[in-house]
Image: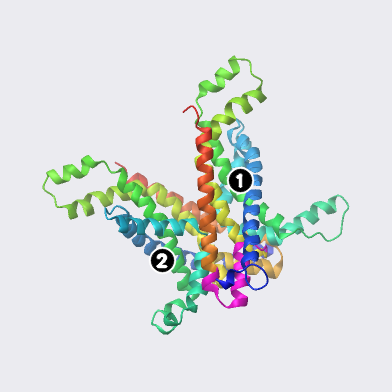
């Protein structure tokens, strides 16, 4: 055990953890909107819209995240019209490519979580709202969405933790996140176990915090 | 389409071999995972707190740390650990383990943590009366376990295990960082030499979709088989 290396690498890894958290939070926020949009599309009665939303979540849940990042980072640059458009400013940055891939990926899982949450809402609750003369729109925003969010909290907590682990793939497109820096230190010092303990410990700490935060929210919004 | 031709002109046969490799690694990793689950599930269910703790550390650490980090640990630390063990037996030559073994072990340990949780849940949800009835009928411990508990447990576990299989299948793409030529690595090589990453990575995505689709169909059949009588 090389304790000196562990102590020396700790601040570096902690700095890299900030990058990981940034990637995680931005992609979760974008992914939540994508997920909500596609969950609503899934509940649409129009079969084409419905199938389109199903196809999206099927493809993104059925393929590895690594493939998705590579298609966006290496693949999209090949399209001439994209390279000359304003989108190129975003797509040439590995940071944004990683976030797009993460957001689309977590969006697919989130849409499934929210869809099943919407479907478990008892019809009686919606009917009660209707009989009180509340408009459909307000029922949706004030009744259905809050209940769905409460229902999906446990599953969404798991998704956040999966996404935290998913952000480690950003290191494959040259980003120096926690895993990226850990790999760099391992390959320069050849002390994999020490670095694994420190980096793994930071990841575990983050999982622990997320886990407890979700538990707290579950308690707060339980009825 | 020429890019996918078999033989020297295209990448068809290479990608086909890579797909077989992905399947082979996934199955090996899944089986290694089952062996880990076979060790850690009894520990989780044990009456002794210290044994519970060991199993809990295993599942919590592995499920809380990114797969890629575990793979790097094995990739950089694997041969060192083997050499350390070998040196205790007086063998001091350099030992290199190949990417297939490292990869399947890394992924296997990860899938084992998920399988452990699933087996634990499944065994705990079997009716207590089943254990008691088996005891009353004078079955030996061994027979109780293999003839009564395992068949019932499998019925409950298979739907969740199919999720683990999907996760394992997708995780194998991460082994490409160690240089093992599976779908992802082969697409990387092909994309590099043809300068057509969009096509090859999209094709890799299609291959993975196909694998998940076919395996879902097969697992559904298994599920039906083990739910006979329910």
A91 lies above or below B23:
below
Q: Is residue A32 part of the magenta span, yes or no?
A: no
Q: Distance between the residues labelled 1 and 2?
A: 31 Å
Q: In this view, does A154 lie to the left or right of A140?
A: right
List the residue tagged with mark 1: B112
Mark 2, residues whose alpha carbon is within 10 Å: few (<14), some, or many (≥20)? some
- Secondary structure mostly seen in the magenta stretch: helix
Q: Position of residue A199 (x, y in %)?
A: 59, 60
Q: In the depicted view, which residue is nearer to us: B226 or A96? A: B226
Say if mark 1 contacts mark 2, CB within 8 Å. Answer: no
Most distant residue in the bottom direction: A84
Locate residue B160, reporting x and y percent.
Answer: 50, 42
The circle drawn on residue A26 is 2
User: What residue do we see at 51% from left, 38% from top?
Assistant: B223
Judged from the image, the secondary structure of the residue bearing numbered disc 1 is: helix
B194 in the magenta segment: yes
**B196 and A20: which one is in front?**
B196
Magenta stretch in the rendered image:
B180-200
- Answer whether residue A202 is visible to the viewer in this image: yes
Residue A92 appears left or right of B36: left
């Amino acid at each position: 055990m090389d304790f000196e290396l562990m102590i020396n690498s700790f601040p570096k890894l902690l700095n890299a953890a900030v990058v990981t958290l940034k990637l995680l939070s931005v992609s979760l926020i974008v992914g939540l909107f994508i997920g909500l949009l596609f969950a609503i599309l899934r509940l649409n009665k129009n079969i084409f819209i419905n199938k389109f939303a199903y196809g999206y979540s099927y493809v993104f849940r059925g393929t590895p995240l690594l493939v998705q990042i590579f298609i966006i980072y290496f693949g999209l640059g090949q399209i001439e019209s994209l390279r000359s458009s304003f989108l190129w400013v975003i797509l040439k940055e590995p940071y944004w490519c990683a976030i797009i891939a993460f957001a689309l990926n977590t969006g697919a899982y989130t849409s499934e979580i929210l869809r099943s949450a919407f479907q478990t809402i008892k019809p009686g609750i919606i009917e009660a709202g209707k009989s009180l003369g509340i408009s459909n729109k307000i029922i949706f925003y004030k009744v259905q969405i809050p209940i769905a969010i409460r229902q999906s909290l446990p599953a969404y907590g798991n998704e956040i933790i999966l996404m935290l682990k998913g952000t480690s793939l950003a290191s494959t497109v040259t980003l120096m996140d926690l895993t990226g820096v850990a790999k760099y230190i391992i390959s320069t010092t050849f002390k994999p176990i020490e670095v694994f303990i420190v980096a793994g410990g930071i990841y575990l700490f983050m999982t622990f915090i997320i886990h407890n935060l979700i538990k707290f929210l579950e308690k707060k919004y339980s009825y | 389409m020429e890019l996918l031709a078999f033989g020297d002109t295209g990448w068809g046969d290479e990608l086909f071999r890579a797909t077989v490799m992905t399947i082979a690694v996934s199955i090996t990793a899944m089986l290694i995972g089952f062996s880990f689950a076979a060790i850690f599930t009894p520990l989780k269910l044990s009456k002794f707190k210290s044994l519970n703790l060991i199993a809990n550390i295993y599942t919590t650490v592995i499920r809380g740390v990114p797969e890629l980090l575990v793979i790097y640990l094995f990739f950089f630390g694997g041969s060192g650990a083997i050499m350390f063990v070998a040196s205790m037996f007086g063998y001091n030559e350099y030992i290199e383990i190949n990417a297939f073994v490292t990869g399947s072990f890394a992924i296997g340990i990860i899938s084992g943590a998920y399988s452990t949780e699933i087996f634990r849940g499944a065994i705990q949800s079997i009716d207590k009366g089943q254990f008691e009835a088996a005891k009353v009928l004078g079955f030996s411990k061994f027979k109780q376990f293999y003839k009564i508990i395992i068949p019932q447990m499998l019925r409950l576990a298979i739907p969740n295990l199919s999720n683990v299989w999907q996760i394992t299948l997708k995780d194998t793409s991460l082994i490409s960082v160690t240089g093992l030529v599976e779908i992802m690595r082969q697409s990387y090589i092909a994309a590099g030499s043809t300068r057509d990453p969009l096509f090859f990575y999209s094709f890799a995505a299609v291959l993975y979709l196909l694998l998940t689709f076919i395996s879902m169909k097969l697992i559904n059949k298994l599920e039906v088989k083990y739910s006979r009588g329910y």
